[in-house]
Amino acid sequence: MPEAVMFYYQNKIHTVYFSHAKAMLPVKLKNGNCKLVIWGHREGENTELPLGGWARLSNIRDGKESHWNMYSPKPVQIPVEKFMEKNFEGRPCWYEVTHGKCLQGLLAHHEDEYRLYIVTIEPEDLSNCHYRWPHILTSSII
């Protein structure tokens, strides 16, 4: 699960860690611009949205049984340059996102509040050293 990301926003590079209060990630809009949205829900925050900053793709696809359904989930694109995962020893490892690719996000809302979650999958390569991996997509205007 990515614990940090690096992205360009307003011509500046930003490094954001999920653990930081009010951490925000970019969401790609239909017109190609980006908007920053709060990344998930950390303990101690006053929100009804799910705790954490990640959503398993398998849980989203559970159809009517998915707990995400109550939050009117919307798939979005998160344009990033790099993301950071910690290996089994707890050391940070940064991974570049190929040009033209982005992370899949889930935009959830409750009443007037929106939060962004990074969609994760089980890695195809079991020697990867990570249990969950971001779902990486080809970037496009959606």
Image: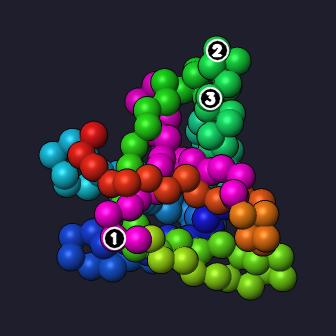
Q: CA distance from mark 3 to mark 1?
A: 27 Å
Question: Residue sitting at 73 percent across and 70 percent down?
Answer: 128
Residue type beneath disc 3:
Arg
Precedes in sequence: disc 3 or disc 1: 3
Foreground tag (2 vs 1): 1
Instruction: State whether the magenta stretch is mostly helix, strand or loop.
Output: strand
Q: Is residue 9 left or right of residue 129?
A: left
Precedes in sequence: disc 2 or disc 1: 2
Is residue 56 visible in this depiction of the protein? yes
Q: CA distance from mark 2 to mark 3?
A: 9 Å
**Which residue is identified by label 1?**
99
**Which residue is identified by label 2?**
64
* 104 in relation to 112, above or below: below
Dot 3: within a 10 Å radius of its alpha carbon, few (fewer than 14), some, or many (20 or more) residues? few
Residue type beneath disc 1:
His
**Which residue is identified by label 3?**
61
Please tell me whether mark 2 sits on a helix, a strand or a loop: helix
On whether residue 131 falls in the magenta region, the answer is: no
* 29 in relation to 108, above or below: below
Q: Which stretch is magenta?
A: 98-124
Q: CA distance from mark 2 to mark 1?
A: 35 Å
Name the residue at the top extreme: 64
